[in-house]
Image (tube, coloured by chain):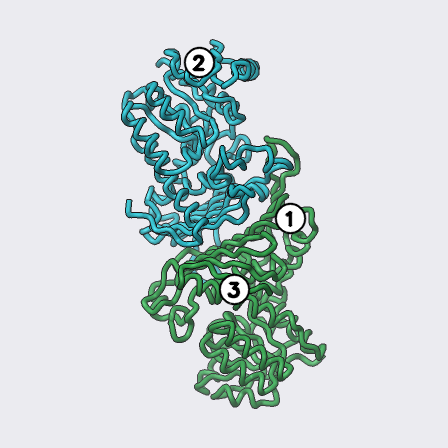
Chain colours: A cyan, B green
Amino acid sequence: MKPLRFGILGTAGIARKNWKAIFHSGNCTVTAVASRELDRARQFIAENQRETPFPTTPTPFGSYEALLASPDVDAVYLPLPTALRKEWVLHAAAARKHIVCEKPCAISAPDLDEMLAACRQHRVQFLDGVMFMHAPRLAALRQLLDDGDTLGELRRITSQFTFLGHDGFLEKNIRAQAHLEPLGCLGDLGWYNLRFALWANRWQLPRTVTAQTLRQTETGVPLDFSGELQFPNGVSSGFYCSFVTFRQQWANVGGTRGYLQVHDFVNPFYGHETGFDVTQILQDGPRAVPHVRRVTVPGHACAHPTAPEAALFRNFAAQVATGQINPDWPEWARLTQLVSDACLTSAKTGKPVTLPAA
Amino acid sequence: MKPLRFGILGTAGIARKNWKAIFHSGNCTVTAVASRELDRARQFIAENQRETPFPTTPTPFGSYEALLASPDVDAVYLPLPTALRKEWVLHAAAARKHIVCEKPCAISAPDLDEMLAACRQHRVQFLDGVMFMHAPRLAALRQLLDDGDTLGELRRITSQFTFLGHDGFLEKNIRAQAHLEPLGCLGDLGWYNLRFALWANRWQLPRTVTAQTLRQTETGVPLDFSGELQFPNGVSSGFYCSFVTFRQQWANVGGTRGYLQVHDFVNPFYGHETGFDVTQILQDGPRAVPHVRRVTVPGHACAHPTAPEAALFRNFAAQVATGQINPDWPEWARLTQLVSDACLTSAKTGKPVTLPAA
C-alpha cells in the first residue's frame, strides 16, 4: 500500500508531536510543510528530520495555498489556531485534500457545518485530532461498558482535564487569546471531556446543558470552566476543565453495578502502559467491600507505533485507502461542537440550554 | 470522668450503628431508648444489648416526651426522619438535653435557625451526625491541604456519593418519601458532598450555586442530583449524589501543584484501613510522570473505637464535659443547610442562586 502523503499546515508545537505520529503510523508520510514564512517551514523540517527522519525530506512551502496546490499531498494535518481553521478547511476541501483538523474544530457549530458541508461536497475525509478515540484502550473500555454486566445500566460520567499554565501562559500562549482561541480551556481541554461523555453514552446528544465560566481573561476567554450534561436516556455527566489547576485527566463512568476509572484518559501518563480500574462489589450485603481490578492494555504514551496519535493517523490512512468516506468521524466532531456551543451559551446567559432532539 | 448518658429518640436502622458507636466511644453510655411504641423500644434494647451490651440495661420509653423528662439522660441522639427533627430538637433543647442530630438537620435553613436558636437559648450543644468530620483521616487530610506545598493553591473539589436503592427502595424506604424526607438524596447523601466541600475550603460560603434534579419521585423527592458551587476565593466544587447509581463515595481535591483522592470519604471501605492518595509531579518537564503515594491513617470502618462514628460521640462527650458550648458545630450544620437550600432552589427554578456574603 502506498503511504498517505501528508502536508502540515502550520508549525505549531502540536505539529511536532504529530510529525512523529505520522512517522509511527506505518502507513503515512509527510511530504510537505507550510508556514507563512518559508524559513520557518524549512527550520521545522530540518529539526524534525534530525529527530525522526522520513526517507524523503518533505518540501517546505511559504504559503498554505502553495502546499494545497501540490500534487504530492493527499491529506493535510491542520494545527492552525481555531480562528483560522474554517478558512483553511474550506480551502483544503476545495483542493480535494483529506483533512485531520485539530480541536476545537471551529469557533461555532454553524461554522463547522459549513466546513463539513465542503468536505462532503468535495468528497474528502474529515477527522478531528482527538487521539484517545483511536487508542487501543478505548476498545477495551467499550467492551466493558457494553457487556451489560460489569457496570449494569450507565448512570453517570464525570471527568476532569486540567493543567496549570506556566507563568506568562495567559499573556503569551495563544490558547488564552481571544482572537485566535476564543473557546479557551473549553475548546482546548473541554473538547475531550465532552467527547468522552458523548462516546461513553453512545453519541446521544444531551437534552439540557448547564455550564459556567469560573475564570476568564479580561477579553472573555474561559480559563476555568465546568458543565453538566443531561441526556435523554437519564444518564448525566459533569465535567471540569481548566488552565489554572494542576494536571489531572481522569474520567469516571458509573452504572448500576460498578464503575470504571481512567486516570489518564487523554494522554497515557505512564509511558509504556495504559489501562483503567474497574470497581465492583462482588459479595452482597452491608459489609461488602468493593473489588478493584486493573485492566491493562498494551500502549505507549507517544512517539511509538502503539501511541494513540499514531493510531489516529493509521486509521485515517486506512479509511482513505478504502475510497469511502467514514461519515461517523465528521459527525463526532459536529456533536462535540454542538455541545461545546451549548456550554458557552449557558455560561454566558446563566441559564440551562435545551438542545433539539438529534 | 462520668460517661455522658445518651437517650436514643427512635429506633431507625442508623440507631443500631450508633448504639455501637456510643459503646465504642469510651466516654458515653446509652441509658434510655424511646419509641412511639414501648414494645419497639424494648425490642430494640434487647436486640442491641445481646450484641453490644452496656453494663446497665437502658430504660425503654413509650414516648419521646417521657424520655426527655428522664433525669438519667444528659444528651439525645436523634435518628428520627428529617420532617420530625425540628419538633424534637426544640423539645430536647427545652428539656436541656445536648443533641446529636442526624442529617439533613432540617427541612430548610430557617427551620434549622430556629432549632439552633433554641439550643443557644438553653445552652445545649448541637452536633450533626456527619461521622467523617471526626475521623482521624480528616486531620491528616487537613494537614496536607494546609501545608501550602503538596497541593499549592486550592482550585477544585469534586465528589460523588451514591448507592443503588434495592428493588422496592423507592416505594418502601422513607428516604424517598416526600412527607418524611423531602430532600431525598440531596439530604441523605449530598449533605456529605456539601460538607466535604465546605470543610475543604475552610467554611467559605459559596457565592453562587447551580444545581439540577436529574431524577425525582412523582412527589418531587430528588433521587439523582448534581450541583456546582462557586466560592468567593475562586475555588469551585462539583458534586453528584444519587440513589440510582452503584455505590461510590470519592472526593478529589485539586490545587495548583497536586491533588488528593479519597476513595471512601464517607464510610471507610476497607474495614481496618483508612487513607487517601496524593498525586504530584515531582520532576518538571513535558515528560514528567505523576507520582502517586498512599497515605494511610489507622482507623476502622465501624463497630470499633477507631471508627469515625465512635470518634464523633467521644468528641461530643469530651466537649460537653468542658461545660462550654462549641459554636463551630452548629455553624457547620447551618452552612451545610444553607447550601443545600440553595441547591434545591436552583434545581427548582433552573437558575443559579446567589448567596449573601457570610
Q: Are marks 2 and 1 on the same chain?
A: no
Give the residue at x 42% y 72%: B181
Local crowd size for mark 2, using a 10 Å CA cut-off: few (<14), some (14–19), many (≥20) = many
Mark 2 vs mark 1, CA separation in Å:
46 Å
Q: From the viewer's perspective, is residue B228 above or below residue A309? A: below
Numbered badge on residue B153: 1
Three-letter code, disc 3: Val
Question: Is label 2 in a helix, a strand or a loop?
Answer: strand
Q: Quadrant of the C terminus of chain B?
A: bottom right
Q: Quadrant of the N terminus of chain B?
A: bottom right
Give x and y (percent) for residue A205: 33, 45
Q: From the viewer's perspective, is residue B254 above or below residue B323? A: above
Three-letter code, disc 2: Thr
Q: Chain of mark 1?
A: B
What residue sits right under mark 2 in the picture? A31
Q: Nearer the viewer, residue B177 or B79?
A: B177
What residue sits right under mark 3 in the picture? B339
